[in-house]
Amino acid sequence: MSVSAIRVTSPFTEPAKIVRAIAGRMKSGRRVKLIVFHSHYRPGGVRRIIELALPALARERRLGVNTVVLAGGEAPDGPWLSALRASLPGVEIVCAVAPSAGYVSESREPVVTLERRVKNFVEDLLAEAESGRTVVWAHNLGLGRNLPLARVLVQTCGRRGVRLVTHHHDWWFDNRWQRWPEMRRAGFRSLKAVAEVIFSTAAHVRHATINRTDQRLLERGLGRRAGWLPNLVAEPAVLPGETVTAAKAWLERMLGERAPVWIVPCRLLRRKNLAEALLLARWLRPEAWLVTTGSVSSLDEKAYADALQSAAERHAWRLRLGVLAGSGKASPTVPALLAASEVVLLTSLQEGFGLPNLEAAAAGRPLLVRSLPNIAPDLAEFGFRFPQAYDEVWIDRGLFDERAETARQQRIWRTWRARLPESCRTLASPPPWWESGAVPFSRLTLRAQLEVLVHPAEETWARSVQLNPQLARWRRQASEGTLKVSRWPRKTSGWLGAASYGRKFAQLLDTEPQTVAPGVPARISQKFLRAKLAGENQYPMLWSLKS
């Protein structure tokens, strides 16, 4: 069946038009079974999970999905929507889009007006919903980018008898404290008020996390209402030779030469720690280009991206950011780019799941990856081993202005801490600072990282190789083309396959709600805050949008 898109493209358009159009389709026997909510459908990890998961959910008999509504603040792009249609034969897809459902920070409307539009949008969206026959699958409400909408969504689903799965990929309190002033301006004046929305204990709400660390913490307060739903992944598939050849040719045109490509499949985000990826590429494969796939998708990240791009142009570094941004229909897919590249890197300071780890294994490409404590145990349980995993890249402190960086970090940390909610300030401790010897590159501000990169690569390598003994082996293997590929474990499909995903989603929906003690949301929030504000989880680059 062809895709029909119902768009509310203006904040002045009445959302009731959505319902009338959907109702017309329901007369023919179709019902709105699954409403997917995401603030935007820009390229990224959440959109990737949606596109992979929807076919799995449609095939799960206990769910019986035959119509999907993609609801949010922005319409998905045409090519992506067409590809989604092809993957869901027999399922009708409707797009319900209103700017009020996007990021509050990107809206210029007064809060009162925004709240009214959000309420109208959600209530009209669910006006024809049938209890027991409609499910809302909402992504990343825990980022706090639109708490008025999250609150209305919980309340309206409750009144309509609609089951709501709130799917947590990231958290607002995980080095994203710029969200706190936004939430206060939106009327959420206390951490308790925020927690009661994000960690709702309403009987119709289920919480899904993508890593077991988060799930265990939620489970202590919410019981079986909190489930672990690890991201599903596409099974390894050998791409046609002509597809990989075309991707290589496309990269050559983009770079203006034929050269090895080391790729980071990500958007331009500070937490991706891309300067570290560039440092590793320059050390281990000087002739390679470091390429990232996505571009900036949030105004919060623009200063970081601009600083990195400006430095790369000024110093003629072999770096190309966001190759897929605005590249049009002729651009390769991310899997094709991975297959066409020599090495994949993931140098993130924080991740919720680590999807690129698995994408590199699926593509049969070597991976250089920071080992993150919240996801490494899960990946090991799935059966993955990553031969080129590391904890930190250590830097000779003489490679940057130590006095200026120390003063900079102290100043930024004091400013950052002062802006925390008062009750959180005693929980916040600065990250460790090394009095002598080496310093982890990840614990520097972007300015200090760029100071290191300004030095000739061979100089920084000579002064740091003894601090990172495994890198000498990897450099030799990179030049020989013998870096190791993570094998794809046989048992992975049992954890991350489509059938498993659909089954786990249905099981979470069918879980009988347990009695939840009063005050649980605030207690969950406090436990998360205590962990996230500990010094070992603090990175100076994430304290300020300008650092």
Image (cartoon, helix red, strand yellow):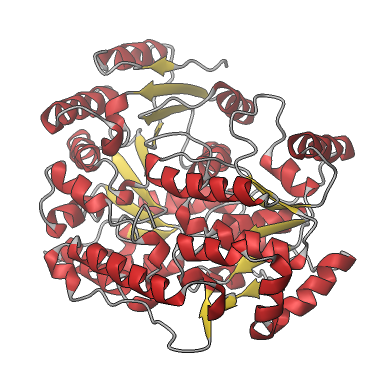
- Residue 395's image quarter? bottom right
In the picture, the quarter occupied by the C terminus is: bottom left
Query: Where 91 sits versus 316, above or below?
Result: above
Query: Where 506 sits versus 224, above or below?
Result: above
Query: Where 317 sits versus 79, above or below?
Result: below
Residue 106 on image: x %, y %: 30, 33
Which residue is rendered at x = 31% and y = 11% of the image? 20
- Residue 242's image quarter? top right
| Nearer to us in this view, 295 or 507 | 295
Which residue is rendered at x = 77% and y = 55% of the image? 288
Asked whether residue 374 is in view, the answer is: no
Residue 249 on image: x %, y %: 83, 36
Count of marks, rendered view: 0
| Nearer to us in this view, 312 or 68 | 312
| Nearer to us in this view, 179 or 503 | 179
Query: Where 507 sits versus 221, above or below?
Result: above
Asked whether residue 227 is in view, the answer is: yes
Which residue is rendered at x = 49% and y = 74% of the image? 373
In the picture, the quarter occupied by the N terminus is: top right
Residue 341 on image: x %, y %: 77, 50
- Residue 129's image quarter? top left
